[in-house]
Amino acid sequence: MADQVRVLVVDDSALIRKIITGLLENDPEIKVIGTADNGESAIEMNNSLAPDVITMDIEMPVLDGLTALQRIIATNPKPVIMLSAHTRHGAEATFKALEFGAVDFVPKPTSQESSWADAIGEQLRSKVKSAYKSKIVAAGQILVSEKKGREFDKKDASSKIVGIGTSTGGPTALIHIFQSMPKNFPSSILVVQHMPEGFTKSFADRLNSSSHLKVKEAEDRDLVMPGCGYVAPGDQHIEIEENKNKRYVRVFRGEKVSGHRPSIDVLFDSLAETIGRNAVGVIMTGMGKDGAEGIVKIKTAGGRTIAQNEDTSVVYGMNRVAIEKGGIDAVVPLSEIPKKIVEYI
């Protein structure tokens, strides 16, 4: 990176502003150019300082982070990373922020979290650099086609399983996909979304409430059923296991793979090895290359593979690497992914 990433840090706590600034400036490629203690000041400083990236708290006086985010995206858009509390309310507000146009989030530190710097610092710096290269997608800017392809009957059945992997920009894209899946979908969907521990259950609940599918945070030994979706828990891998003509989700901690836990490669490798030609792999927006090797294995095993195209990706990274490796059957915009999944099913 030739120039430093210039960051505006927004939080009503002076302690948190100091912690975030210190964590970011541990990387010589990142420079904090200003701090703000409320959303109104954040809007003014965004206009006057022109930062490359903004980190934004949600609950603040004068003007809250969600409202400030919406105004920034509408008037002078910049990549925004939200600081999110480890609570159900915090998770729900975070997913609203992602729908409003935030590119990513990190768990917010508290004075009780003495190990926060070690656990989150590297993640925060990585996400700031990723956000610097990202595309800002405001609410409603990426729309799913109203034509969903064929509808299924209750009697329809499929031996295929869909695996979806995504990272930065993924939560909003996944909501669009799940909203667009038809009734009586005869297959199962397993999802790896790079997301911290403590947020994946709320995210699975959000997908469940917006979809015809029954979606849950995966638990070890869940029976894989048609019309159901399973989201990898934060900080744990998922695989598929087949035994006596039944398929199960296995959830385990394990080492990080491709720099991540959960790892898309772990899921895709498992689908390739266990069900081969009955697998449908989908790789979407996100920084890095997690999932690229695994989706090549799915294609080699006779399964079908889909990648989100560059124009609709917040970060064209993992999907770009997968395409370059020759592992993709179809490169389509986000709006076409549900129809392509249905076609392959």
Image (spheres, helix red, strand yellow):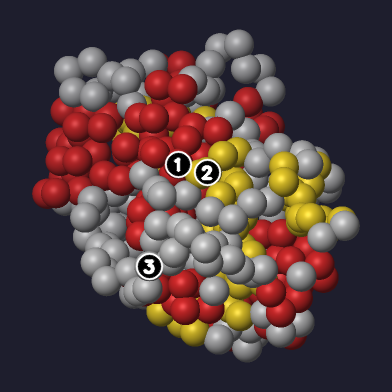
Residue picked out by circle 2: 215
Residue 118 percent location from the top left of the image: 68, 32
Looking at the picture, how far across and down is residue 272, in whole percent?
A: 76, 72
Q: Nearer the viewer, mark 1 or mark 3?
A: 3
Question: Is residue 55 positioned above or below 299 on the image?
Answer: above
- Name the spot of residue 112 as percent of width and height, x first: 60, 11
Q: Which residue is identified by label 1?
A: 208
Quick one: which residue is furthest to the left in this view? 75
In the depicted structure, whether residue 286 falls above or below residue 234: below
Say few, some or many: other residues with alpha carbon within 10 Å of mark 3 (under 14 / 14 to 19 / 20 or more): few
Cα distance between the residues tagged 1 and 3: 19 Å
Q: Specify the quadrant that holds the C terminus.
A: bottom right
- Contact between marks 1 and 2 (CB within 8 A): the answer is yes
SS at badge 1: helix
Depth check, mark 2 against mark 3: the one in front is 3
Q: Which residue is mark 3?
A: 151
**Residue 224 placement, left or right of 41:** right
Q: Is residue 247 left or right of residue 140?
A: right
Q: Alpha carbon of mark 2 to alpha carbon of mark 3: how far?
A: 19 Å
Image height of 141 relative to 6, above or below = below
Identify the secondary structure beneath mark 3: loop
